[in-house]
Image (tube, rainbow, N blue to C red):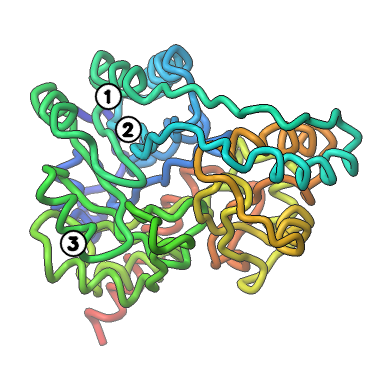
């Protein structure tokens, strides 16, 4: 990969930040060890992806719910905005829809539809298109610099194709065992997702852990570092340079940040979502599976409260996600955050409004460098 980022830094400053140029940076051809999390469903835009890459990090497009044609268009639009490396994130857990309890679930969802004034849904089967094969085909054809995955590893034949095309592979994990599996599967770097992280838990198999594996970042990162040879990227509650330095001390070679960019200028997060984020605290989030059937951390709201009171088990992913989509979409149109999925991590008091992604990256690096300089001189 060849980055064409212009670098205005002076030679003196380059010397000062050299120790932030970790092996991760060299492998992915980026200036700074900061990855943008792949935020699917709207928050992660083409402009945000390109802005993070242009600022020296690795921008990542959250493409899990996108149709293949839309992914191809987005990739080409990103390339119009940056010559720097970027990634595309997809979900690898592809299971058929489970409609065994659809009538029961739709009955509960209809109570929410009534509150929003949208049509009731009869107890019909839910159908979710499976675009995974075609999504990966597009990524391979477009030769994206990086493919990142959640919920598991790429199938071996896809990994071989990606490697042959010179594409780097990043896998999100939540346990040491998952990290070992990811390394054995051929990934180039591992994202160690701590329980503080916003959005979907990356746990591979939730059969025996319905809410996923939830180990804190500080406990998870050094244990994974001790058991794999590929670079580890810390994720979960990291919002600034202090988090970056802490991750490096724990043995990570970089960080992944998602929540920090949700209120950036380039964010695609709904304005009502952003307002809720800025009004929330470290106590505002919960891990829930009621929106998608997969555990994810987000701000607690009326949707979650109503569902938890009914005692009905959500349908598995992706069936539940498809079944709740009309409610979430209607809520967004009405600017009603009570019925939207408000994915967010636990570092909410550190959010700011009106900053560009590039400014957030530079502020994070500057703060980290100041801390490291102070440590070195003390």
- Label 1 to label 2: alpha-carbon separation: 7 Å
Q: Left or right: where does residue 324 sit relative to residue 334?
A: left
Check residue 187 in the rendering and tell me which mark sits there, or answer none: none
Residue at mark 3:
19
Discs 1, 2 touching: Cβ within 8 Å = yes
Q: What residue do we see at 62% from left, 47% from top?
A: 291
Real-space Cα separation, disc 3 to disc 1, in angstroms: 28 Å
Name the mark on residue 86.
2
| Most foreground residue, 29 or 157 | 157
**Front one among 149 and 46:** 149
Q: Which residue is rendered at x = 20% and y = 34% of the image?
A: 155
* Residue annotated with mark 1: 144
Q: Which residue is drawn at 18% across and 27% down?
A: 158
- State which mark lies toward you, 1 or 2: 1
Is residue 36 rendered to the left or right of residue 275?
Answer: left
Residue drawn at point x = 61 percent, y = 40 percent? 265
User: Is disc 1 surrounded by few (<14), some (14 to 19) or many (20+) residues within 10 Å?
Assistant: many
Q: Position of residue 80 (x, y in %)?
A: 40, 16
The C terminus lies in quadrant: bottom left
Indicate which label's residue lies in the foreground, 2 or 3. 2
For residue 351, which quarter of the picture? bottom right
């Amino acid at each position: 990969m060849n980055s064409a980022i212009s670098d205005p830094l002076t030679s003196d400053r380059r010397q000062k930040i050299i120790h932030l140029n970790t092996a991760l940076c060299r492998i992915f051809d980026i200036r700074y060890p900061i990855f943008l999390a792949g935020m699917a469903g709207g928050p992660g835009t083409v402009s945000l992806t390109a802005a993070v890459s242009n600022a020296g990090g690795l921008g990542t497009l959250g493409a899990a719910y996108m149709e293949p044609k839309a992914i191809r268009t987005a990739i080409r639009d990103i390339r119009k905005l940056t010559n720097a490396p970027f990634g595309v994130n997809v979900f690898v857990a592809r299971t058929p829809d489970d409609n065994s309890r659809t009538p029961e679930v739709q009955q509960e969802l209809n109570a929410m539809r009534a509150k929003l004034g949208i049509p009731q849904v009869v107890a019909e089967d839910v159908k979710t298109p499976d675009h995974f094969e075609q999504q990966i085909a597009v990524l391979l054809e477009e030769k994206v610099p990086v493919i990142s995955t959640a919920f598991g590893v790429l199938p071996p034949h896809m990994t071989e194709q990606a490697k042959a095309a010179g594409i780097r592979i990043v896998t999100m994990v939540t346990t040491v065992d998952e990290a070992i599996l990811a390394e054995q599967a051929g990934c180039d770097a591992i994202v160690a997702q701590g329980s503080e992280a916003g959005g979907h838990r990356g746990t591979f198999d939730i059969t025996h852990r319905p809410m996923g594996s939830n180990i804190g970042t500080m406990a998870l990162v050094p244990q994974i570092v001790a058991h794999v040879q590929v670079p580890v990227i810390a994720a979960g509650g990291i919002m600034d340079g202090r988090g970056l330095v802490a991750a490096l001390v724990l043995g990570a070679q970089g960080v992944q940040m998602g929540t920090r960019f949700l209120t950036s200028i380039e964010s695609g997060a709904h304005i009502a979502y952003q307002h809720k984020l800025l009004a929330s605290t470290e106590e505002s989030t919960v891990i829930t599976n009621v929106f998608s059937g997969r555990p994810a951390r987000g701000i607690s709201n009326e949707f979650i409260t109503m569902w938890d009171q009914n005692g009905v088990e959500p349908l598995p992913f992706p069936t539940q996600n498809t079944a709740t989509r009309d409610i979430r979409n209607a809520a967004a149109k009405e600017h009603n955050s009570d019925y939207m999925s408000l994915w967010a991590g636990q570092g909410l008091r550190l959010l700011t409004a009106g900053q560009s992604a590039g400014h957030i990256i530079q502020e994070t690096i500057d703060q980290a460098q100041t801390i490291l300089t102070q440590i070195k001189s003390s």
